[in-house]
Amino acid sequence: MSYPHLSRRSALAKLSGAAAALVAAPAVARVAIKQAPVVSLSDGVLTIEFDSGMHSRISKAGKALTAMEPGEAIRLGDQRIVDRFLLVEQTQETVPGGQAHHLRGTAGGGIEKRVSVTFLKAYPGLALLDIRYRNTGTAPLAVDGWQTATHDLLAHPDGAWSFSGASYPDRRDWVQPIRPGTGQRNFMGMNASDYGGGTPVAVVWRRDAGIAVGHVDVVPRLVSLPVAGQPTGTRIAIAGDEATVLPPGGTLTLPPVFLMVHDGDHFRALDAYRRLMATRGIAAPAIPEPSYAPVWCAWGYGRDFKIAEVLTAMGKAKEIGLEWAVLDDGWQTSEGDWKLNPAKFPHGEADMKAFASAIKAGGMRPRLWLAPLAADPGTDLLRDHADMLLLDKDGAAQNVSFWDAFTLCPAYPPVVDYFRGQIRRILGWGFEGLKLDGQHLNGVAPCYNPAHNHKRPEESYEKLQDFWKALYDEAISINPNAVMEICPCGDSFAFHNIPGMNHTPASDPTSSWQIRLKGKTFKAMMGPSAPFAGDHVELSDRHNDFASHYGIGAIPSTKFTWPHDPVNTTDPLPPGGIVLNPAKEALWRKWIALYRVNMLSKGEYLGGLYDIGFDKPEGHAIRKDGRMHYAFYADRWAGAVTLRGLPPGRHRVKDSFTGQPLGTVSGPEATLPATFEHFLVLDTTPLDGKTTA
């Protein structure tokens, strides 16, 4: 039996897996046999054309974005790539909410490919792809991997940008410009012992159009979503490397996939993904009012905090307008046992309850730090319950590097029950929320611990979302307004975990740029009024960039100390320290007051109005209470800024930060001369009685 294939692609595939080959492959390896399309499927925005070999071309509103190329392929056990199938049948049917088209093809008489393309009226420009391969031969067929939705977005003179939903230990930007020769595999599993998981979507876009792909399964899948810069364009795909053997008549069914064309940056694609996944049962829960309250965290004192200094600084936090007081790492004897540190709480639970009561008496809300699924070697927990560990094929534990701990298996019922008990215990002390913290929270490796009786090792990875939902449900059953914050330090947040949280921070941002791009991404993935905190402002540019919190509708957060800098901290102090000196206090008060007046975090973030990659200066817009709010960012800017999304009519404009009036403009789009350093935040008020919807 023989199969047609592209020899140069096959040679590359022999060197590495499907996803890696996609990143590494030179442009010439993607040249397909040129044939006219024989099938054209469209919803009026997205058009997918297929030729007689079932290669495909993607167009948006009649403009081709890709060449005719092999969108799907499987890699056989002998490393041959099969990517050409003779199209033999096409049918279509009306389905709830849209139209489905079914294509069937064959390769060498031994492999059948079926592709279903479904357009939904509620999602113009988006198609659902369901793909299956069947062994129609007489002998078993070894398959080493597959790839689908594989396309090169044609090059544009202005270049391209990308969003990648994978997690990496270097905590790289989720949004990056694409250059020839650069690329990422974007594996959704573990990319280090304690960094993994993410949002299974990749987006590449030019100034005029973009392409997004991802899977829409209700559980996370161990797939890759590679993006790569090529001389002729930007490659995007979804791929899997799990080997299987198909018996005669056996079928390989790929995860359900979406393919989308769109305008602007990644926001519209992720927003559509969020809405689509909500119809499948994966959505953010109802958000309680306390989730939007501004935050002070005691992490400025590190693990060596003293109760007296925390309560003293908390008083200052209340005075300047903050509402949450978060006690961070250091209250416990170890990760795993979660016993109270006797040096800080000598009378045990009585002292902890008194501490939570003191925070409430001071007019603030107490929240406590916890690192679920981490257990230190030598703890009583691991001595008595070693069965809780997540183990790899060789019986080794998975490391959590920051705490020198091991990972527990989230799919093992005793682990779930243990941490449900911790939630009851902490809320019983009087805390009103938890900060669930650690880079290991986002994803875990497949578990081979024989004590767990997993049907498949991947259950640990797939059921992590159930673990978080169990903890969330436990907390809400006790206190319906409990805030459950998940902070997967530096990871690209795992979308499937969203039902188990009602608050998230920027999660250890390395720059103000990361704060803003993460905020835009979360407002797409959780909803336009998502409760996203900017994390400690001390982690931002210049260590005081509240403008990057305020302008994207983020909740302000800080870890200042007062009245002195801390003596011993885990994190090094920035220049000038983190003490709230008089100059800082004036600035902190101003931004926190501005936040509390406008509460832009509860407004409608309009992420489709500005392209975070191409628009200069970088722009963001929020609609709130009949007014439009804008934020622009650049190191230095002298020129016009464009106000998009205004309703028709005249509007008064002022600088939100200084209060200075800046004249009037007319909607729906206006330009305004501006000169600024770092940021400009604006507030518009309609003058003719018309308000935004």
Image (spheres, helix red, strand yellow):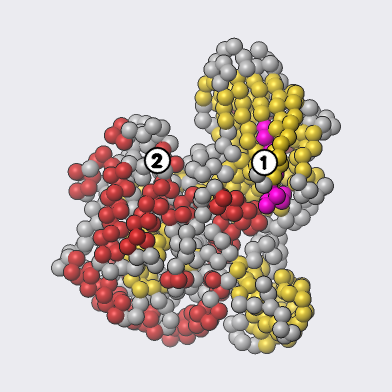
Amino acid at pointer 1:
Val
- Quarter-of-image position of residue 358: bottom left
Q: Mark 1 points at which residue?
A: 95
Image quarter of the C terminus: bottom right
Residue at 45% across / 71% down in the picture? 289
Residue extending farthest bottom: 660
Residue at disc 2, secondary structure: helix
Q: Can residue 541 be seen in this view?
A: no
Compared with 396, 400 (above or below) is below
Compared with 153, 22 (above or below) is above
Q: Is residue 118 part of the magenta span, yes or no?
A: yes
Q: In this view, does 251 lie to the left or right of 456?
A: right
Q: For the magenta stretch, what is the residue range? A: 115-125
> Of callouts 2 and 1, which one flags the residue occurring earlier in the amino acid sequence?
1
Amino acid at pointer 2:
Ser
Residue at 28% across / 62% down in the picture? 426
Residue at 56% across / 74% down in the picture? 600
Q: In this view, does 617 lie to the left or right of 511?
A: right
Q: In this view, does 288 lie to the left or right of 675?
A: left
Residue 443 horizontal/vertical position (percent): 44, 46
- Quarter-of-image position of residue 78: top right
